[in-house]
Amino acid sequence: DAGVTQSPTHLIKTRGQQVTLRCSPKSGHDTVSWYQQALGQGPQFIFQYYEEEERQRGNFPDRFSGHQFPNYSSELNVNALLLGDSALYLCASSLDRRGNTIYFGEGSWLTVV
Amino acid sequence: AQSVAQPEDQVNVAEGNPLTVKCTYSVSGNPYLFWYVQYPNRGLQFLLKYITGDNLVKGSYGFEAEFNKSQTSFHLKKPSALVSDSALYFCAVRDMRASKIIFGSGTRLSIRP
């Protein structure tokens, strides 16, 4: 049983560019959340997708957007990249919106130069 | 608002000795508490959770956590530390209203041979 898988694992972008990160949830999980973990900090909640809609959102600007597909996989898009967007982006999945155990992927390391 | 605090940035323990990583929480209602571990350049791995029931929760890799309602604490413990336990540990609380996980700032655990 595959866990949460994310791609790409590492990428480098230039300021002002756009990036798309991808996530496949753990088998049987239908809820996907995205977190940003800056260096030396704990993960911060970006948003959550359930039934292909954004259900909850953290304190992140509109440059951060997402999508969930019918197979429950998800994408995180970040537009107009800033140097401060450099971070580890973690995808998490759970059985449902109130699933008590949330599983995380290995993350996508984004460096903005 | 829900929150967790990890008062120690770093904990150093000799191999074979017991270890404790501290966490205190602030929640309204019943707390849903978690511990995650992060190895270098990796994602988050679930260790254990407290939802209800016994105050002593057993988790992965020999770790356990003690829920103390009167002290609002959820300390992570292990009777005998291994060098391979060296990693970054995060305490977290589930914000049930927002269906998201709120993380502490993390504690770096270093086990010396």
Image (tube, rainbow, N blue to C red):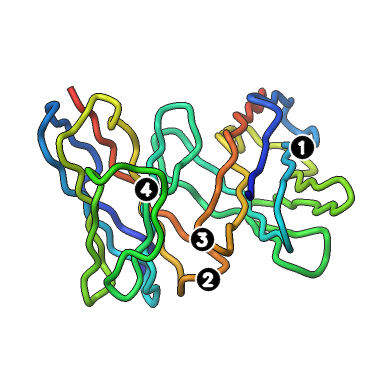
Q: Chain of mark 4?
A: A
Whether callout 3 and callout 1 share a subunit is answered yes
Q: Nearer the viewer, mark 4 or mark 3?
A: 3
Kind of residue at disc 2 = Arg
- How far, Cα to Cα, is label 4 from label 3? 18 Å
Q: CA distance from mark 3 to mark 1?
A: 30 Å
Question: Same chain for marks 3 and 2?
Answer: no
Q: For residue B20, which numbered disc appears in the image?
A: 1
CA–CA distance in space, label 2 to label 4: 19 Å
Across and down, in percent, residue B22 comes to 74, 37
Q: Nearer the viewer, mark 4 or mark 1?
A: 4
Spatial distance from mark 3 to mark 2, Cα to Cα?
A: 9 Å
**Which mark is in front, 2 or 4?**
2
According to the picture, the residue beneath numbered tag 2 turns out to be A98
**Is B29 located above or below residue B113 in the figure?**
below
State the residue position of label 3: B98
Q: Chain of mark 3?
A: B
Which numbered disc covers residue A76?
none
Which amino acid is tagged 1? Thr
Please tell me whether mark 3 or mark 2 is closer to you in this view.
3
| Count of residue discs | 4
Horizontal side of residue B69 vs B100, given as left or right? right
Disc 4 target residue: A90
Eyeballing the image, is A46 above or below A113?
A: below
Q: Residues within 10 Å of mark 4 (few under 14, many from 20)?
A: many
Both labels 2 and 4 in a single chain: yes
Dot 3 and dot 1 residues touching (CB under 8 Å): no
Residue B41 lies in quadrant = top left
